Each structure stands twice: as C-alpha cells, then as structure tokens.
Amino acid sequence: MRAVLSLAVCVTVVMTAVSAHAVDRCTAPPAPAADFSRCNLVGKDMSGANLAGAKFENADLRGARLDHANLQGANLKWANLQKASARDADMSGAQLFHTIFDEADVSGVSFRRANMFGAKMNFAKAVGADLTAAYLKDVNMEGIDLSHGRIVDSYMLRAVMIDGRFAESEIIGSDLTGASADGAVFTGANLSGTVLSGAGLSRADLRDADLKGADLTNADLSEARMEGVRNRPAP
C-alpha cells in the first residue's frame, strides 16, 4: 500500500512540475527559438519582437499583435492567427502548414520560401505581401486583398482565390493549375509565364493584365473581363 501511495505522490509531483513548466514557457518573454507550442496567446502583443526560429505549433494567437516581428524560420504549423495583426513582419522560410490567417492583417509581410501548404487566408488583408517561392498548395484565399503583392515562382496547385483582389500584383512564373479564382480581380496584374491550366476564372476581372507566356489551357474564362489585356495567348 505504501508503494502505491508513494507512486501516486510521485506521479502528482511530476504532473504538477510539467504543468508549471508549461505555464512558465507560455508566459516567457518573446525570444529567438522560444517555445510557445500549444500556448494560449490570444491578444498578446509581440510587436517588433525577435522570434526567429520560435515554435508556435498549435498556438492560439487570435487577435495577437506581431507587427514588424522577426519570425524567420519560425514554426507556426496549425497555429491560429485569426484577426491577428502582423503588418510588415518577416515570416520568410517559416513553417505555416495549415496556419490560420483568416481576417488577419498581414500587409507587407514577407512569406518568401515559406511552407504554406493548406494555410487559410480567407478575407485577410495582405496588401503588398511577398509570397515569392512560397509553397502554397491547397491554400485558401477567398476574399483576400493581395493587391500590389508578389507571387513569383510559387506553387499554388488548387489554390482557392475566389473573389480575391490581386490588382497590380506580380504573379510571375507561378503554378496555379486548377486554382479557383472565380470573381477574382487581377486588373493591371503581371501574370507573365504563370500556369493557369484548368483554372476557374469565370467572372474574373483581368482588365489591363499582362498574360505574356501564360498558360490558360482549359481555363474557364466565361464572363471574364478582358479589356486591355496585353499579350493574350492565342486560343
């Protein structure tokens, strides 16, 4: 009986210690390589913080402030940044696998070379964001405002871009095969060399866009606006 009681006491002590460690970890000051995995960081202000290589896997960052933060190479897999503000933050090379940015403000953010497979950016404000060489397969961008952005040499197979705004953006040499961009706005955008094979572009606004070398094979352009399109590929 004494052995059983001793074991129970040991287990309780260990669990208490683990719990205390988790609390300490989640309340630690922002720092490079810090571990905030699974932490509740709702509304936390980490603006301007150096969080390079930090871990935020499965963290709750709804409404958090990360403006101008350095998140290079950070791990934000499955993190929830709904309605967060990360204006001009650096997320280059970050792991953003299934990360939620719905209704967030990520204007001016560098997502260069980030792994954004399955990320959700629905109705996000991403004006001027840079997604050069990012992996964006199955990303959801419905209603996003990515005007004046850069999506260069990026992989966006089956991306959902319905009703998004990409006016004056550089979408060059990227693969948008099978993308759903019905009703999206690409006015004045540079789509040179981009693959839009099988893409849904019905009701899309492509006025004054540059389609030099773009692949529109089997793309649905029904009711799309094409006035002033430059270098339109031959049918």
Image: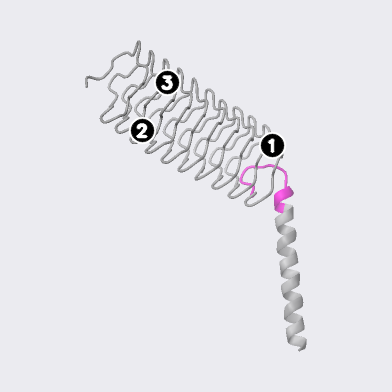
Secondary structure found at label 3: loop
Q: Earlier in the sequence, mark 3 or mark 1?
A: 1
Viewer-closest of 211 and 37? 211
Quadrant location, the C terminus:
top left
| Mark linked to residue 33 | none
Q: Estimate how packed mark 3 is, as few (under 14), some (14 to 19) or many (20 or more) residues with alpha carbons within 10 Å.
A: many
Q: Residue at x 32, y 13 (%)?
A: 230
Could you tell me residue 184's position as x and y percent? 44, 25
Say which residue label 1 marks. 46
| Residue at image mark 2 | 176
Q: Vertical placement of 179 versus 77: above or below?
A: above
**Which residue occupies the foreground of this view, 89 or 204?**
204
**In the rendered structure, does residue 28 fall within the stretch colored magenta?**
yes
Q: Residues within 10 Å of mark 1 (few under 14, many from 20)?
A: many
Mark closer to the chain start, 3 or 2: 2
Query: Relative to 169, does residue 124 appear above or below in the rendering?
Result: below
Q: Position of residue 190 (x, y in %)?
A: 38, 19
Q: Is residue 139 left or right of residue 32?
A: left
Residue stretch rendered in magenta on the structure? 25-35
- Kindly give the residue lying farthest to the top in the view shown: 228
